[in-house]
Image: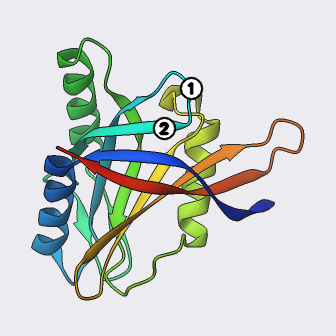
Amino acid sequence: MRIVPQRVGGIAWISEKCLESIIAEARRCFPLETGGVLMGYWTPTKVEVVITRSIGPGPASTHTESTFEPDTAYQQDQINRIYAESNRIYTYLGDWHSHPRLAEGLSPRDKRTLRMIATDRRARAPSPIVGILTKRHTWNLILWQGSIQRLTCRLVVTRLHLRRFL
C-alpha cells in the first residue's frame, strides 16, 4: 500500500457534548483501548467537517491494551437511528479510538482502516475521518482525514485542525 506523507488540512468542528462523551468512554475503559463512530456533516465546500454525534463501542465490544473490536451491529443500528432522526443530515464520517500508550499518530492498522472505508461504497465516506484520543496530562483528540488519489490510488492522510463549539 502506497501512502502519501501526512500533511495538515481542513478544519473539523466538534460539539463539546460529543467530545465530552468520547472522553468519558475513554476514561471508563482506561488503560484499555476503546472507540466508536463519528457522525455529522461536511460543509458545502468540503473543507470543513462538523462532528455532532458520537456512538460508543457497543455492549458486545472487546477491549485490550492495544486493540478494540466494536459491536458493529449496535453501531449500525445507532447510525441508522441518528441518520433518520436528523432527516438524513447527520451521516457516518468515520471512527475514533483511544491510544492508551500515548501514540498520537496513525498506526498501520489505522491507515488500512482509512483506506478500507474510503474505498467501500457502502460506507458512503470517500474522505473518512479517524480520531485518535490520547492522554498525557489531559485528554487530547487528534483527527485525521483519509482520501484516495484518483490517478495513483494512493491513500492521502491529512491532519485536521480541531475546533470546538457548543
- The residue singled out by tag 2 in the image is 48
Rendering quarter of residue 79: top left
Is 12 on the left-hand or right-hand side of 151? left
Residue 10, how many percent across, how many down? 55, 47
Q: Residue furthest right?
A: 151
Residue 53, how many percent across, how many down? 23, 39
The answer to whether mark 1 and mark 2 are in CB contact below 8 A is yes
Q: Residues within 10 Å of mark 1 (few under 14, many from 20)?
A: few
Please state which amino acid type lies under the numbered disc 1.
Thr
Q: Quadrant of the N terminus?
A: bottom right
Measured in 3D between alpha carbons, the distance from the residue under mark 1 to the one under mark 2, in whole angstroms, is 7 Å
Q: Can residue 89 be seen here?
A: yes
Q: Residue at x 38, y 33 (%)?
A: 92
Observer-nearest of 67 and 149: 149
Please say which color scheme the image uses.
Answer: rainbow
Q: Residues within 10 Å of mark 2 (few under 14, many from 20)?
A: some
**Disc marking residue 45:** 1
> Which structural element holds mark 1?
loop
Q: Residue at x 56, y 36 (%)?
A: 47
Is 100 on the left-hand or right-hand side of 93? left
Residue 2, how many percent across, how many down? 81, 60
Q: Quadrant of the C terminus?
A: top left
Q: Residue furthest top?
A: 87
Q: Can residue 1 be seen here?
A: no
Q: Residue at x 48, y 37 (%)?
A: 48
Is 18 on the left-hand or right-hand side of 44? left
Q: Is residue 67 above or below residue 41?
A: below
**Disc marking residue 148:** none
Q: Is residue 108 above or below residue 11?
A: below
Q: Residue at x 34, y 63 (%)?
A: 97
